[in-house]
Amino acid sequence: MKLHFTKKEINLLAKNYTVFIPNFPTDKMFALEHRCGSYMLFGDQKSLQYLACLFLVASIHRDKMIYVPGTTKLLPQDLQHFSTYSKNLDMVFMHHSIQFHTKLWKEMKQRMVRSKGELKSFECNPRQFSNLDYEDYSPFTYAENKDTILIKKYADTLFFYGSKKVFEFASGGLEPLSRTGASYFMRNGGHDHDHLDLFTAEHQGLCIDFYDEALWRKSR
């Protein structure tokens, strides 16, 4: 699939940052803090495919930030009981090497509003890492593995700091989940999900869930 972004160049404290903002629908994508250190992302079929591509775009742009504003500010009623509060959180993906301090985020957002952007497009295959086997994943199971996604929450935003490899591997289960989620719900009445705790720091957790608001409402 071809994805379009708005690219913005921001200068902050004598340092230049490049930010990509999606120009495709993200209104069916939801992010929340489940409990302290544990986070959940929800999306319907298309949104989960987009989310896989966001991981992949982040993986290949080690000097760029991917900013996904929550176009829906409040979580759907169905999801509010999963969350510590009712807000739908923004998301930012970046490499550890950018060394961005979250305390600068509010000023960064203000400058993005005032900054002009240019269109950037990328081809993305959300299934690119969907066929990995145990041997591929095994390095992430070692206690000494430090290649993880670190998640920070600040100013109603989740920041995902990772590396090329961990973003790639974390994307692998999302496209299959996008295809099985609806049938799983119709069969079992629950939401199919993919735990990414293998790729997060030891004290954190991340779960990706299939959620189609129209499907859930139709089943009532």
Image (cartoon, rainbow, N blue to C red):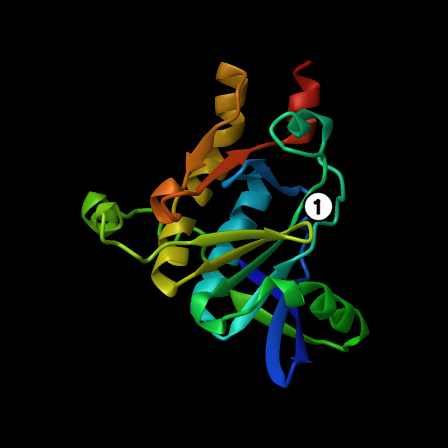
Q: Does residue 27 appear in the picture of this structure? A: yes
Residue matched to label 1: 27
Q: Residue at x 67, y 25 (%)?
A: 78
> Quadrant of residue 186 in the image?
top right
Looking at the picture, how far across and down is residue 149, in whole percent? 42, 54
Tell which of 36 and 122 is nearer to you. 36
Indicate left or right for 56 with 77 as reference. Answer: left
In the rendered structure, which amino acid carries the disc numbered 1?
Asp
Q: Is residue 9 left or right of residue 143?
A: right
Residue sitting at the far right: 114
Quadrant in which the C terminus is drawn = top right
Crowding around mark 1 (Cα neighbors within 10 Å: few <14, some 14 to 19, many 20+) is few
- Where residue 168 appears, as percent x and y from the top left, is 38, 57
Q: Residue at x 68, y 61 (%)?
A: 23
Disc 1 secondary structure class: loop
Q: Residue at x 62, y 68 (%)?
A: 20
Q: Is residue 58 above or below residue 16?
A: above
Is residue 43 at least partly visible in the picture?
no
Q: In front here: 53 or 31? A: 31
Residue drawn at point x = 44 percent, y = 72 percent: 97
- Quadrant in which residue 31 is drawn: top right
Vertical placement of 203 versus 103: above or below? above
Q: Position of residue 61 (x, y in %)?
A: 48, 71
Q: Indicate the position of residue 205 as horizontal and vertical percent values.
A: 44, 40
